[in-house]
Image: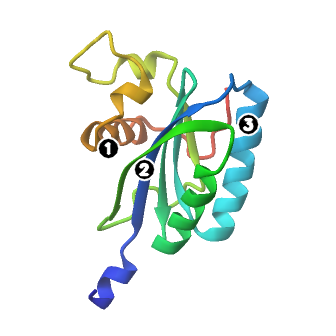
Amino acid sequence: MPLELWDMPFQLCYASTATHDFSRDELLELLTYARKSNAEKGITGLLLFQGGHFLQVLEGEPNEVRGLFKQIAQDERHTDIALLFEELVSQAQYPDWSMGFQTLDGSEWMEFPNEDSNQQDLRALAQTMGRAKELLMYVRKQGLDPAKDIG
C-alpha cells in the first residue's frame, strides 16, 4: 500500500437495532460516553437514531475504527448489526465531530428524498451502501451542530 494511503481517513458504517426502547437519558449517556471515548482515540463520526434503529459512521485511523467497531458489535444494547461499508476516503467528512447525533423523528427526516414515501424506517432505508451514504451526507449538510445533545 502506498505511504500516502496511510494518511487517508478511514470510514466504517453500520446499522443496528436496539434491544429495548432507549429513553432520552440512555441516549444522552451513550452519546456522552462515545464523545469522550472517541476524542481520546481520534475517532469522529455521526450517530443517527430513529424508531429503535441506529445508523452510525465512524471515521479515523483504520485500526482504531475497526477496534471500536469490534467493541460496538459486542454491545448487548443492540442487535442485527449490519456492516454497510468500510473504506478510505480522500478527506475527513467529520473532522470536528467526536460524535454528531441526530434523531430522525422530526421534519428533517420527512425532507429526505425517498422513492418510497411510505418507507421512513431508518434500518430499511439504509440497507444499501449508496442510500446509507446519501442519508449521512443529507443529515451532515442540514447544519447539524456536531456538539448537539439529545433533544
Give above or below for 30 relative to 4: above
Quadrant (top left/top right/bottom left/bottom right) for the N terminus: bottom left
Residue found at the very far bottom of the displayed protein: 3
Assess disc 3: are there few (<14), some (14-19) or many (≥20) residues with their C-alpha within 10 Å of its C-alpha: some
In front: mark 1 or mark 2? 2
Tell me where residue 78 sits by quadrant.
Answer: top right
Q: Secondary structure at mark 3?
A: helix
- Marker disc for residue 133: 1
CA gap between label 3 and label 1 equals 25 Å
Q: Residues within 10 Å of mark 1 (few under 14, many from 20)?
A: some
| Amino acid on which the number 2 mark rests in the picture | Cys
Q: Of the residues under marks 3 and 1, which one precedes in the sequence?
A: 3
- Please name the amino acid that badge 1 sits on: Lys
Identify which residue is drawn at 42% across, 50% down.
13
* Residue named by callout 2: 13
Residue 86 screen position, x and y as percent: 36, 59
Q: Residue furthest top?
A: 118
Quadrant of the frame with the C terminus: top right
Q: Relative to 17, is 1 above or below?
A: below
Q: Position of residue 44 (x, y in %)?
A: 54, 58
Q: Which residue is mark 3?
A: 28
The amino acid type, in three-letter code, at marker 3 is Leu
* Pointer 1 with pointer 2, Cβ within 8 A: yes
Which label sits in the foreground, 2 or 3?
A: 2
Q: Mark 2 or mark 3: which comes first in sequence?
A: 2
Near-viewer residue (88 or 78): 78
From the top left corner, tell me how far across and down residue 102 is, in percent: 54, 33
Alpha carbon distance from label 2 to label 3:
21 Å
Q: Which mark is residue 19?
A: none
Quarter residue 125 falls in: top left
